Image (tube, rainbow, N blue to C red):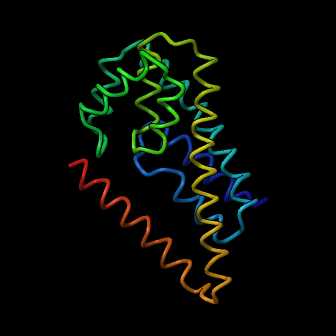
Amino acid sequence: MGLIWILATVLWGVAEATLFFIVPDVLLTFAAWRRGGRFALRLAVMAAGAASLAGIVMWCWGRSDPAGAEHVMLLIPAIGPDLLIRTKAEMSGLWPLHMLSGAVSGVPYKLYAIAAGGHHIALLPFVLASFVARLARFALSVGLAAGGAALLDRIGRPQWQRPLLIGFWILLYATYFALRA
């Protein structure tokens, strides 16, 4: 399947679920472009699993030292007190739905994991909901990237795939960081 792709995907999934601030979707969308949607979907499952397992570490941290975990989260780019307050409030209600909507609205998963531990949400349901929320977002990214690549192939512009994908991620992160500043 491509050991380098697998290792990069798993490591990126773990990193972003803990302290890294660039989503695995970047790698997954490039995989969809380079190797196809089916390949990238298999990687998305691996990324979701790795992120969910890393979420256990964050859940434990949030349970044992919520103030310390929140302090470290505030050191990560684009995470502010507003996101901490939001995730804590969302984990008090219909938290699985909030994790799913947060996955597509720019709320880092790691904040949900810490808040879940702090709210003493049972670990197994949290991990299962984590996997579903992460996979849904990763699959959406892969589907959009694969669909975009297919469209560009169909209109005879496959050479636009790479620059458009790079441009998309640069624009998305420039906008996200500007709005979170």
Taking the image as shown, residue 88 lies to the left or right of residue 36, namely left
Q: Residue at image x 44%, y 68%?
A: 168
Return the x and y of residue 146 as percentages of the image width and height. 65, 66
Q: Residue at x 56, y 46 (%)?
A: 137
Image position of 168 (left or right of 156): left
Counting the numbered discs, the total is: 0
- Above or below for 75 versus 148: above
Q: Residue at x 59, y 62 (%)?
A: 144
- Residue 148, position in %: x, y? 60, 71
Residue found farthest to the bottom = 156
* Residue 14 placement: quadrant: top right
Q: Tell which of 42 and 76 is nearer to you.
A: 42
User: Residue at 64% of width from left, 17% of height from top?
Assistant: 124
Q: Percent x, y for residue 105?
A: 41, 44
Q: Quarter of the image containing the N terminus?
A: bottom right
Q: Relative to the observer, which residue lies in front, 67 or 145?
A: 145
Compared with 149, 175 (above or below) is above
Q: Nearer the viewer, residue 62 or 45?
A: 45
* In the depicted structure, whether residue 163 falls above or below residue 128: below
Q: Residue furthest right?
A: 1
Q: Is residue 1 left or right of residue 167?
A: right
Tell me residue 100's x, y (percent): 52, 35
Give the quarter of the image for residue 50: top right
